[in-house]
Structure formats: structure tokens, C-alpha cells
Image (cartoon, grey):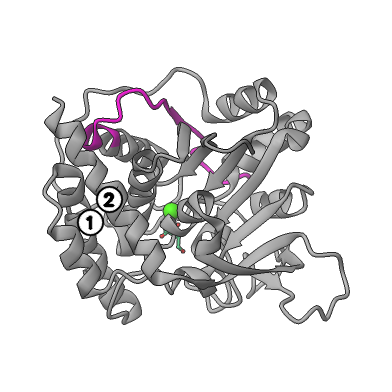
Amino acid sequence: MLENQKRKIILDCDPGHDDAIAILLAAGNPSIELVGITTVAGNAEVEKTTLNALKVCEIAGLHDIPVLKGCGQPIVRKRETAPDIHGDSGMDGPVLPEPSKTIEEEHAVDFIIRKLLESDGEITLVPTGPLTNIAMAIRREPAILPKIQEIVIMGGGTFGNWTPTAEFNIYVDAEAAEVVFDSGVPITMMGLDLTHQALATEEVSERIAAIDNPAAKFVSDLLVFFRKTYLEVFGFEHPPVHDVCCVAYCIDPSVVEAKKVRVDVETKGELTYGTTLVDVHGVTGREPNVNFAMKLDHTKFWNMVAEALKSYSKVYSDR
Ligand code: BDR
Ligand code: CA
């Protein structure tokens, strides 16, 4: 990549409290070009996650970033959503006005294919929800494969949060995840091992609350709700903002320490459907297919988020 050139990403998401913060980090950091926001069914139905993406754009003044609706169902299994964690809307907590912005007519899968085929291989895909859209794009147009710079995934881990061994994004559409992990494209994986280190501590929440603009206020409100559900459902003192780790890595890969490992996705197990088998110790002897993030630089991470949120003050002062 040339120096000073922005890293182009397509954020494929299911907002989602942490997805929403991921959007704000991507759009608020000068080294990222957010080519588009594509949505998928995950935390809530795709109509809801799409409306939430539009609301995030509205509150942050992101009028020029296209939002495209994607798949409403996993490829094989029945849809599952996460209202206990994200509320019925998928992004409960903050009260936001109806957006004036609308979605593009193109389907998210078509947009991903078109943008990649038009590119010179400089676009990174950042899926922070179930992998349905990405797998559908790969299956529909395999010619995109050599065009993808990298796929930076939030999903999986060496333990689960939806079943004892499966993480939500992978569990919801494990067949899609299998397609992606077996694609041969360079993959960086932000699994639960990493994302559970991205905790919004009270100190972090206070720091964000001190930033005086509507985007930061929105994030504060998101964190209040997320803190409550993470305590109720998982007994966590502080909520982990999983999806934000993917964008932080795209901005500065040194925010994590990672290791090349083999990862396979279980799609047949009666009790283990959606589990990622992360071969941390190399016992399979198989060629690594994933750059597996293991340790987060918490200070660097939250500095990035705070700087991005401060950047929205300018959006409002320019209005
Ligand atoms: C993942 O599931 C969703 O609840 C979050 O948005 C995140 O992408 C964590 O398991
Ligand atoms: Ca998500």
C-alpha cells in the first residue's frame, strides 16, 4: 500500500451496538475509506439491522456512504437473532430519529461483487455479523477471490458465547462461515479470545461521555444498554465491543498480537454446530489459513475510538 493511501473497507454488519461503534470508528478515522456498509440478518432481522445502519449514518452525518441491504436468512439453517443482548430493535437504548437517508437499490451481495471486480485488489472485507453475504458473493462470483485484499472477521474463538463452544456470528450461519474460512483468501480473525479484551470499562465510558457531540452521546447511550445486558446475560462487569476490534486492526494491525493457525468450522456436530476449531498448538499439522488475534493493546484501541468520536464534533460545527 502506498504511504498516505487510505485502506478501503466494506463493512458487512448487523447493527448491533458494537457494529454501530465499528461504523463510527471506520468513518471517523482518516486512514480508512469506508466504501460501503452492507447489512445482514444477525442480531436482528435484516430490515432492522438496515434501519439501524441508516440511523447510525444519520446521527454521524455520514450522508455519502452507501448502505445496502443484504441477506435476510442464513444459507441453510433457520434464522436466529439476539434480542436478549441487543434488544428487539437490534440496537435498543439510544432514542434516535427516523433517518432521512435511504438504502441503495442494489443488493449487498451484488455491491460486494461489483466493487471487488472494479478494484485492483485493494478492498478489505470486514464482516462483523454472520457471514451469509460474504459466502453468497464468493459462491456467486468466484472471480472476486483474488481481488479481496483480506477478510477481517469478528467471529468464533476457542470457546463460545451462544453455545458452550460456538460464537454467535459463526453459529448463525456456519455453512457460510465454512465457505469463507475455506476460501483461500487471507483471513484475520477477531474471535472471542481477543474481543473479550475490548472491554468498555467505567473509565472508558466516562471518557466517551466527556466528548461533546451527538455521535459520542449515541455511543454512551449504546454502552449503557450493552453494559446492562452483558451483566444480565453473561455476568460481565464491562461489555466487550467485539466488532470494533476488526476496524481497529484495519487502521493499525499492531493493535493486536496474532498467530497464524489452522481454523475449521464445524457444520455437522449435533452439539458443536458453529464451533471454530482453532489449532493454536498446530496439532493437525495442516497449513494455517487464519491470522488469529490473541492479545489486544487496550490503551491503543480506546485511544483510536476516542479520537474517531472527537472527529464528529467537526461534522456538527460545520452544519
Ligand atoms: C458478535 O455477536 C453480536 O452480538 C455482536 O454484534 C458481535 O458481532 C459477538 O459474538
Ligand atoms: Ca455484529
Residue at 29%, 75% in the rendered image: 238
Magenta part mainly helix, strand or loop? loop
**Horizontal side, residue 49 vs residue 287: left or right:** left
Q: Quadrant of the C terminus?
A: top left
- Asked whether 42 or 278 is in front, the reply is 278
User: Can you name the residue that lies furthest to the top here?
Assistant: 105
Return the residue at label 1: 222
**Horizontal side, residue 259 vs residue 106: left or right:** right
Element under disc 2: loop
Q: Is residue 40 above or below residue 240?
A: above
Residue at 14%, 59% in the rendered image: 209
CA–CA distance between discs 2 and 1? 8 Å
Q: Marks 2 and 1: CB-CB under 8 Å?
A: yes
Residue at 54%, 46% in the rendered image: 126
User: Can you name the residue that lies furthest to the right here?
Assistant: 285
For the magenta stretch, what is the residue range? 57-76
- In primary-sequence order, the first of circles 2 and 1 is 2
Coordinates of residue 135 in the picture (x, y in percent)? 66, 42
Q: Is residue 89 visible?
A: no
Ligand 1 sits in quadrant:
bottom left
10 part of magenta stretch: no
- Asked whether 73 or 4 is in front, the reply is 4
Return the residue at label 2: 91
Of marks 2 and 1, the one in the foreground: 1
Q: Is residue 152 visible?
A: yes
Element under disc 1: helix
Three-letter amino acid code at the position of disc 1: Leu
**Horizontal side, residue 222 vs residue 185: left or right:** left
63 part of magenta stretch: yes
Q: Quadrant of the N terminus?
A: top right
Label 2: how many residues lie within 10 Å, few (<14), some (14-19) or many (20+)?
many
Q: Is residue 272 above or below residue 90?
A: below
